[in-house]
Amino acid sequence: MTGVDLQDNYLGKLAALWGLTGFFVLLVYSVYRLTPVAVQALSTELNWYHWLVFALNLGFMAYAEGYRGFQQNFSPRLVARALYLRQRPTPLRALLAPLFCMGYFDAPRRRMLSIWLLTAMIIILVSVIRLLPQPWRGILDAGVVVGLSWGIAATLWFCQQALRTRPFPHPHEVAPAKIQ
C-alpha cells in the first residue's frame, strides 16, 4: 500500500465515521429536544379524543416514519453510502459527509429531489406544529420521537449488518460521475 493509498484509506474511514456520526447527532438531538414537549402533553388532563389521536399518531409514525421511511428505505441507503464514501472519498464528500450519506448530493436526480423536498416539508411541518397549543403539539411530537427513535435503532442495526456482511446488499445510489 502506497502512502497515497494509506492516506485515502484514513480519509475514507474518517469521512464515513463523520457521515454516520453527523446523522446520529442530528436524530439524537431531535429526540432530546422533542421528548420533553411530548411528556408535557401527557402530564396534562387528556380527553378520550386526545388519547385516540395520540394512539393513532404513534402507530402511524412508527409505521410510516420508522418502519417504511427509515428501516425499509433511508437507513440501509445511508449506511451503503457511508461504505461507498469509505472506499471512494473525495475532499468535498469527506467535508460534507453527513449530507453525502443522507443523499443531498452525488445521488441520482430523483433521489436528490425527493430528499430536498422531504426536507422542505419537514421544515414547514415543524414550523406549523410549533404553533399548536398543548396537548396537540406534544401529541404530534410524541409520534415524531417514536419515528426518529426507530430510525436511530434501524440505522444502528444496518451499521452492525454492514460490519458483518460482505458485500453489503443495499444500493448506495451514488450518481455516476459526469464526463467532462
Image (spheres, rainbow, N blue to C red):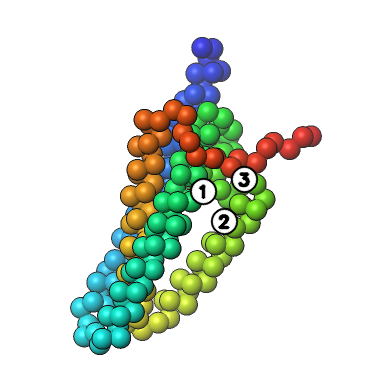
- Marks 2 and 3 in Cβ contact (< 8 Å): yes
Give how far apart the Cα atoms at labels 2 and 1 are: 8 Å
Q: Secondary structure at mark 2?
A: helix
- Mark 3 = which residue? 107
Outermost residue to the right? 180
Instruction: Tell me the residue at 73%/38% (across/down).
Output: 178
Q: Quadrant of residue 36?
A: bottom left
Q: Nearer the viewer, residue 132 or 160?
A: 160
Residue 28 visible to an observer of this rendering: yes
Q: Are marks 2 and 1 in contact (CB under 8 Å)?
A: yes
Q: Position of residue 48 (x, y in %)?
A: 26, 86
Q: Which of the numbered marks, if any, corresponds to residue 115? A: 2
Residue, x 54% and y 40% (percent of image)?
Answer: 171
Quarter of the rendering containing residue 120: bottom right
Sort mark 1 into few (<14), some (14-19) or many (20+) by Cα contacts within 10 Å: many
- The numbered mark, 1 or 3, whose residue comes first in the sequence reads 1
Residue at 37%, 49% (x, y): give it: 154
Q: Secondary structure at mark 3?
A: loop
From the top left corner, tell me how far across and down residue 3 is, in percent.
Answer: 53, 14
Q: Amino acid at mark 2?
A: Ile
Q: Is residue 55 above or below residue 77?
A: below
The residue carrying mark 1 is 102
* Numbered circle sitting on residue 77: none
- Does 36 sit above or below residue 156? below
Left or right? Give the position of 90 relative to 18.
right
Horizontal and vertical percent for residue 167?
47, 29
